[in-house]
Image: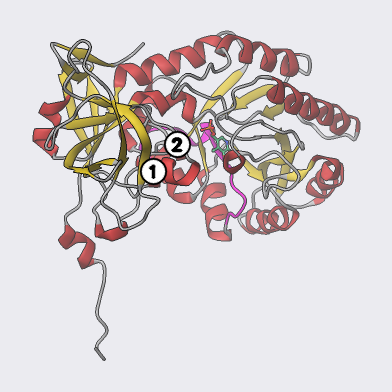
Amino acid sequence: MNAFTYRGGVLHAEAVPLPRIAESVGTPFYCYSTAALDAAWHAFADAFAGSDVTICYAVKANSNLAVIRTLAQRGAGADVVSVGEMRRALAAGIPPERIVFSGVGKTAAEMAEAVEAGIYQINVESLPELRALSAVAAGLGRRAPVAVRVNPDVDARTHAKISTGRKENKFGIDIDLARAVYAEAAALPGIRPVSVAVHIGSQLMELEPFRMAFERVAELVRVLREDGHDIRRMDLGGGLGIRYRDEAPPSHGEYARIVREVAGALGCHVTLEPGRALVGNAGILVSSVIYRKEGVGRNFLILDAAMNDLMRPSLYDAWHTIVPVKEPGPGSAVQPIDVVGPVCESTDTFAVQRPLPPVAEGELVAFLSAGAYGAVMASTYNTRPLIPEVLVNGSDFAVVRRRPTIEEILAAEAIPAWL
Ligand SMILES: *Cc1c(COP(=O)(O)O)cnc(C)c1O
C-alpha cells in the first residue's frame, strides 16, 4: 500500500494534497498516514493471527502520541526505553499490562515508576541493573517481572551503527553467563524472572540472524527450565527491516513462521517489539527549496529541512528517496545534485549527486520513508525549532505536534543574576 501518491500532478498523503498542509503549518513538517500505519500494522499482526503473541510497538521509532494511539487502537502494546516513553504509552491509552521496559541504563527513579505502574515486564541488561531493580522493587513490597536481555553474539548483518547483538555491543548479558544471572535473579527478593529477551539490531534484511538468535534463546529457555526457573515467555525484540530504496525485506509470513517454530515448541508466550516495520513507511518529511546554488561542476539544492530535523543521513549514511511534490512531466530530464540543509556542518547533507528532476526555488520536495527515527531524533541545533508533525486520515489532517516558537525556546533559558 502506498499512501503517498501523485494525484492530478501533486503528491498527496491519502486524499490530502501536501501543498495544502504546507500552507497550513509551514515547512518543513513531518506527515504521517493513518492508512499506511493501519496497513503496516495489519501486515505484521495478521502474520501472527492465531499465535500467542503480543506486539509491543517500539515507541522510540516514532513516539508521537497520535501515532501510538493509532497503533494502540489496533491492539498494540508498547516497548519503551525511558520513563518518558512509558508515560507517552500510558497517555496514548496502552494499558500497563501491555508495556515492556527495555534499555541499558534505567535509573532507580525510572524503575520505581515502572514497578508502581505495574507494567508487564522489565528487561534487564546487566547484573548491577538487576540488583538495583531488586532493591527498588523490594522497597515497594513488589517483585518485578523480569526478562534478562541476552546478547546471543549473532551478526545481524545490518549497518554497524544499528547492530546490537554482538559481543562487542553494549547491549544485553552474554548468553553464556545467563544461567548464573538467572540463578542470582531467582534469589533476589525483588525479582521474578519470567522471560528471556533478545534484540539483535535494526533494519535486518535477512531472516537467518533472527533464526540463529531465537534458537539460542530457545536453548537457554530449556536449560533454565531444567534449572527450575518457571520461564513461560520469550521476548524476541524488533528489527525487521523495511524498503527505503530497492531493498527486499524479509516477508512477514516467513518471519512469523520462524517465531512460531521456535516459540511454539516451548509453549512460550511471545512478545515482539517492532518499531521501524510499523511506522517507517508511514511517514514523510516535506521541505521547501530555499535556493538552487550552481557551483563549479557541482550544483546544490538548499532546503529548509536540515540534519537536525532528519538525522539518519548524517548519522548512518542512510538513503531516503527524495521526490518533488509537483509531479515531474513525462520524460523530464534528471540532473545529479547535492541535496543539503542550512545547518553549519558539512555533514548536513541529505544526498550527494542525487539524480533529480528540476525543482525550482520555493517548490516542495518530500523525503520518503521518514516515519521511523525521524522526528524522534530531531534537535534544535542552530536554534531551529522542532518541526510540526501532521497526521492524515483520509481527507482529514490534524497537527499532532505543533512547531514551538523561538520565544518558547528562549523562555526555557535564564541569564544568571551576576551577568
Ligand atoms: C530499537 C529497539 C527495538 C525496535 O527496533 P526496530 O528496528 O525499529 O524494529 C526493539 N527492541 C529494542 C530493545 C530496541 O532497542
Secondary-structure class at tag 2 = helix
Pinpoint residue 49: horizontal percent, then vertical percent: 55, 9
In which quadrant of the rendered image does the C terminus lie? Answer: bottom left
The colour scheme is secondary structure
In which quadrant of the rendered image does the N terminus lie? Answer: top left
Could one spot residue 399 in this view of the protein?
yes
Pinpoint residue 85: horizontal percent, then vertical percent: 44, 45
Residue 166 falls in which quadrant of the image? top right
Crowding at mark 1 (Cα within 10 Å: few <14, some 14-19, many 20+): some
Pinpoint residue 103: horizontal percent, then vertical percent: 59, 47
Secondary-structure class at tag 1 = helix
Nearest the eye: 150 or 357: 357
Q: Given the image, on which type of amino acid does mark 2 rest?
A: Ala
| Residue located 57% across and 29% down the image | 239
Q: Given the image, on which type of amino acid does mark 1 rest?
A: Val
**Residue found farthest to the right:** 226
Residue 90 falls in which quadrant of the image? top left
* 231 relative to 376, above or below: above
Q: Is label 2's Cβ within 8 Å of ligand 1? A: yes
Q: Residue 359 in magenta?
A: no
Point out the stretch of residues depicted in magenta: 91-106
Q: Residue 95 in magenta?
A: yes
Residue holding disc 1? 376
Residue 144 falls in which quadrant of the image? top right
| Residue located 23% across and 38% down the image | 29
Residue holding disc 2? 61
Whole-angstrom CA distance, mark 2 to mark 1, is 7 Å
* Residues at discs 2 and 1 in contact (Cβ within 8 Å): yes
Q: Left or right? Give the position of 134 relative to 408.
A: right
